[in-house]
Image: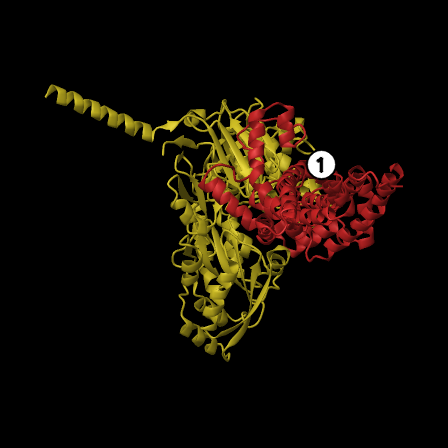
Amino acid sequence: MGRAAVKFVLLLSAAVMALGVAGATEKGGTLVFAGAADPTYLDPAIVSDGESFRVAQQIFEGLVDLKPGRSDIRPMLAKSWKTSKDGKTWTFQLQRGVKFHDGTPFNAAAVCANFNRWYNFSGPFQDASATYYYQAIFYGFKRNEVSTLSKPLYNSCRAKGKYTAIVKLNKRNGPFIMALALPAFAMQSPTAMAKYGANNAEIRNGTFYPTGDYAFKHPTGTGPMKFSEWTVGQRVVLVKNKQYWGKAQYAKSVDRLIIRPISNNTARLQALQNQELNIADLLAPQDVGTVQGNSRLKVFNRPSFNVAYVTINSAKAPTNNILVRRAIAHGLDRQSVVRAFYAGRAQVAHEFMPPSLFGWAKDVQKYPYNPERAKSLLRQAGLSLPVEIEFWYPTGVTRPYMPDPKRNFEAFSASLEQSGFKVIAKSAPWRPDYVKEVNQGTAGNLNLIGWSGDYGDPDNFLGTFFQEYNPQFGFRSAKITNLLNRAEQETVVAKRAKLYQEANREIMKFLPGVPYAHTKPAIGAEKRIRNFVPAVTGSDDLFPVEFGGQ
Amino acid sequence: MLRYVVRRLLLLVPILLGVSVLIFFWIRLLPGSPAESLLGERATPELVAAYKERYGLDEPIYQQYWKYLQSIADFDFGVSVATHRKVTEEIKDRFPATVELAVAAMLFATLFGLPLGFIAAKKYGGVIDHASLFISLIGISVPIFFLAIILKYVFAVRLGWLPSVGRIDVTIEAEHPTNFYVLDAILTRDWATLWDAIKHLILPAIALGSIPLAILARITRASVLDVQNEDYVRTARAKGLPPMTVDRRHVLRNAMLPISTIIGLQVGLLLSGAVLTETVFAWPGMGSWLRDAIFNRDYPVLQGGILFLAFVFVMVNLVVDISYAFINPRIRYS
C-alpha cells in the first residue's frame, strides 16, 4: 500500500508538471510578424496606410484606444474625459507618471503641442496624401492653403496644470472622440519632433517628402515598444520599453518585435509554414484550410469591419426609379455569392456598416433574393423586360471585402438576368481607372466596390458615403443628410446610435446601393502565440504577445 | 583601347537621352496619374484635379520634360509617389540586392551551364549530349515563377533545408556597410551571417539562373562544336599536344567569345531585375520595385529607375566588349 501510494504520488506529480510545462509561457523572445508592405513613414500624423499604422500602434499611444478586438474605445493616455454642455469643449484627465521614450514627460502641454502641431500644418503638410486623417476629421488648418479644405473643427487646446488638457472645437462633433483612437492622432514627443525635424518637408516632383530624420529614424512615443531600426524592404525592429508606464501587465511579453513586408500571399504563407515568421497577416481565403491542417499553426479571425456593396447610381436611368432599385435588390443572390466565394469567412450584409458598430439597426428593410418579385416590380415601373443595365467590376485587384471581383460579378449578373434584367458588362483595372470612374459616378448603373473601416464610428461608413452629395451614388436626400448631420453633431453615444439606426433604415429604404458581405479576414499564426487579439482596423497590438507551449 | 573606351562612354549621353525621352513620354501615355495611386479609394475628382494642378501635371508636356531633364542634371531623380522615399535612396538599397542575386544566378548558370555544354559537345550525339538538350529545354520551358514555387515547396516548406523568403534571417543582427550581404559578412568576418546570406541566395539563384543555364549550355555546345573543327585545332592535335591542352589553349579560348557575349547580355538582363523571382522570394530588388511603380504610375521611380538600368546595361556591355581583347589578344580596339 505504501509503495503504491508513493508511485501514485510520483505519477500525479509528473502529470501535474507535464501539464504545467505544456501551458507555461516563455518569457520574452522575438516575434516576427509579416504584413503585405513596408510602412511609409514612422510619423503616424503624416500617413494613412495600414502598415504604417501597425508599426505606430506599438510605439505610440493616443488619448484613447480601441478595446482589443472591438470598435468601441477605452481610456489610454487620458484616463477620463467629459464634454461641456454645448459639446464643444472636451476636458481630458491624463495618466500620471508617463514618459516618452526620450525620457521627457507626457503631460497636458505635450497634448496641446500635438494638437497644435496638426492644426498649424502648412505647405506640403496640407497635401491630402500627407494628412488625410487630420483633414477627414478636422476639415481644415489654421490657414488653409488648398481650396478643397474647409473651416477647421479644432479651435484650441489649453493645459490646465500638468494633467488636464482642455480641447475646444468650433462645433459639436461626435466622431471626434472615436477618431482619437486612430494612430494618426497619437501623442508624440514634442522634444523629439523638434530635435529631429518632424515638421520639415517639401514637395519633390509632386510628392510629399519629409526632410527631417524624425519620420525615418526617431519616432518617439509613450508605447510599450521603442523604435530600434528600419531597413526598408526588409524589417522594422522594435524593442521592449522597459520604462513603460503599464509594464507590469507585459512582463512576460516579447522583448523584440520584427515587422517584415512580404507582398506575395503565397510567399508569406510559405514563410509561416517554414518557421521564418510567427504571424502572417492577410491569409487568403483559399489558404485557410492549409493553415488549419498544419499541426503547428492556427487561424486567427480579424473581426468583421468592412462592407462589400453594389452601388446603384440614382442619377442614371433606369436606376433613378425606386422600383427598379428594389428590383435590383431582390435580383441579387447575395446568399449564394457569400457562400460560394468567401470560403465561409463572410456573412450577408444588410446595411452599409458592420454589425459590430454602434448604430447598426436589426430592423432595416431586407431584400431576399426573389426573381419573380423583381420582375413584378419592373412591370410595376412600366418597363418592358428585360431591362438593360450597365454593371461594372474591377480587374487586377483583390480587396479584403472582395477577394475575387470577377466571380462576384458573374454570379450577380446571372441572378439579375434571372430577375428581368439584361446586364451590359463593363470592367476596368482597379488602378487607376476603376476607382476614378466609381468616384465620379461614371461607372454605369451598378458597380462592385466596398469599404474597410478606419476608426470605430459609423460616421466613417455612413458619413463617408452619404452625408454630402456623392456623385458615386448620384442622389440627394434631405432626410438622410439631416439624420447624419445630427448624428455627427451629437456627442452622447446612445443618442448617436439611435440616429444612425434611423439613418440606416432610411438608407435601406432609399436603396443607393445593395450591401452584400461583411468579411472576416484571416491571420495565420503559430499555435504557441498567446495574447494576440486581432484589431478590427488592422492596427494590431503585437506587444502583449507571449510565446507558450504547443 | 583607351580611345575606344572614351568613345563608348561618350556614346552614353545620346543613348541615355534617347532612353529618357522614351520613358518620359511612354509612361505618360499610360492611363491615370500618380494622383489616383496616391489617393486610392479616396481619389475624388476634386482631389485629383487639385493634385494635378498643384504639382504641374497639367502643364504642357515639353515643360514637364524640361524640368525633368534639369533635375536629372542635378542627379535628382525625385521622390517615389508610393513610398515617398528618394529614388536615389531606393536604388542604393535595392540595386545591391539585385546585383547579388544576378551574380549568384549567373554563377550557378556558368558553373553548371559551361561544363554541361562543353561535355555535350565533346560527347556529341551521345547520352550526355541528349541529356543536356533535355535539361536545356526544361530550363527554357518551365516558367520561372513555377520553378520558384516548386523549389520553395520542396526545399523550404517540406524539407526545411533552406529559407523561403528574403535576403537574410530577419532576427540576425548584422552590419551591412555596403548592402551586399555576402560581401559585408566577409568584410566583417561574420561567418554565421555569411552562411545565412548564402542559404538565402541558393533557391532564388537556381530559379533565376535556370534560363541562363539552359542558354549557356546550348551556346557553349554550339560554339565548342564550331571551334573544335577549325584547322588550327586540328593542327594543334596533329602536333601531338595533349587533348586537355588543346581544349584549354585553343578550343575554349576561341569558343569563349560568343559565350562571353551571351553572359554579358544575360547579366544585363538579370540586373534589370527579376520581377517574378523577386516577388516569389520577397527579394527586395529592382524588379519588383519597378513592377509596383508601373501599377502605381510612379513616374519618378520609372523615370529614374529605368534610366539607371539603361546606364548599367550599357556599362555591362562595354565591359563585355573590353573583355574580348583579353580573351583574344588579336582583337584590338582603336
Residue at the far top in the pictured view: A2
The chain coloured yellow in the image: A
Q: Nearer the viewer, residue B92 or A488?
A: B92
User: What's the coloring here?
Assistant: by chain
> SS of the residue at dot 1?
helix
The chain coloured red in the image: B
Give coordinates of residue A406: x percent, y percent.
52, 61
Residue type, label 1: Thr
Q: Nearer the viewer, residue B200 or B25?
A: B200
- Residue at x-position 87% and y-position 38%: B1
Q: Nearer the viewer, residue B94 or B261?
A: B261
Does residue B265 appear left or right of residue A427 in this picture?
A: right
Q: Which residue is mark 1?
A: B245
Give coordinates of residue A401: x percent, y percent.
49, 53
Q: For the N terminus of chain A, which image quadrant?
A: top left
Q: For the C terminus of chain A, which image quadrant?
A: top left
- Residue at x-position 71% and y-position 48%: B223
- Residue at x-position 13% and y-position 23%: A4
Quadrant housing residue A430: bottom right
Q: State whether residue B225 appears in this view.
A: yes
Does residue B311 appear left or right of residue B156 in this picture?
A: right
Chain designation of label 1: B
> Label 1: how many residues lie within 10 Å, few (<14), some (14-19) or many (20+)?
few
Q: State whether residue A269 appears in this view.
A: no
- Residue at x-position 45% and y-position 56%: A517
Give coordinates of residue A309: x percent, y percent.
49, 59
Give coordinates of residue B254: x percent, y percent.
76, 43
Q: How many numbered marks does the figure carry?
A: 1
